[in-house]
Amino acid sequence: QVQLVESGGDSVQSGGSLRLSCVTPRDTFRNRCMAWFRQAPGKDREGVAHINTWSDATYADSLKGRFSISRDNAENMVFLQIDSLKSEDTAMYYCAAFSVTGYCPSDLNPADFRYWGQGTQVTVSS
């Protein structure tokens, strides 16, 4: 069973920043599109961003500007930097790997991502 492991979630004040990390088994990470999703209580899982193996990134239109996805191919890790945190950013954040290798999908549909972590909780208080 493929295991993606997220970390870095925390309880923070609004306006703060967090850097989430996800470590992925090498064979899963290599040449594969990686993404971050989030899910707030009572809401559907929402795509935040994805990044291909060459570090070309795509962001959800509604979330551009405060989120930055990056990856370290040598360490098999993907990161999500979140700045100027708002209460509406409160959610469980999940790392995911795309179902096939070589490219990223055109959008951020959770159904297209085969491998998932257990999530890391981000809670923002005002």
Image (cartoon, rainbow, N blue to C red):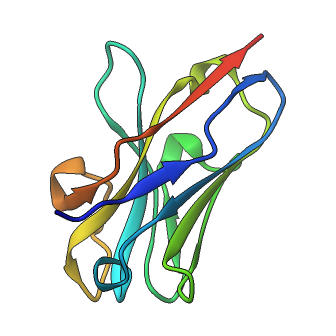
- Which quadrant holds residue 37? top left
Residue nearest the observer in this picture, 84 or 21: 21
Residue visible at 29% across and 85% down? Answer: 27
- Which quadrant holds residue 123? top right
Residue nearest the observer in this picture, 9 or 87: 9
Image spot of residue 118 (x, y percent) = 35, 42
Image spot of residue 96 (x, y percent) = 34, 58
Residue 44 versus residue 50 in the image, above or below = above
Residue 25 versus residue 59 in the image, above or below = below
Residue visible at 79% across and 40% down? Answer: 17
Q: State how many labels appear.
A: 0
On screen, residue 109 versus residue 31, left or right, reads left
Residue visible at 32% across and 13% down? Answer: 42
Residue 31 versus residue 23 in the image, above or below = below
> Which quadrant holds the C terminus?
top right
Image spot of residue 2 (x, y percent) = 23, 65
> Which quadrant holds the N terminus?
bottom left
Extreme-front residue of the structure: 1
Image spot of residue 86 (x, y percent) = 70, 24
Residue visible at 35% across and 89% down? Answer: 31
On screen, residue 89 versus residue 22, left or right, reads right
Residue 54 versus residue 29 in the image, above or below = below
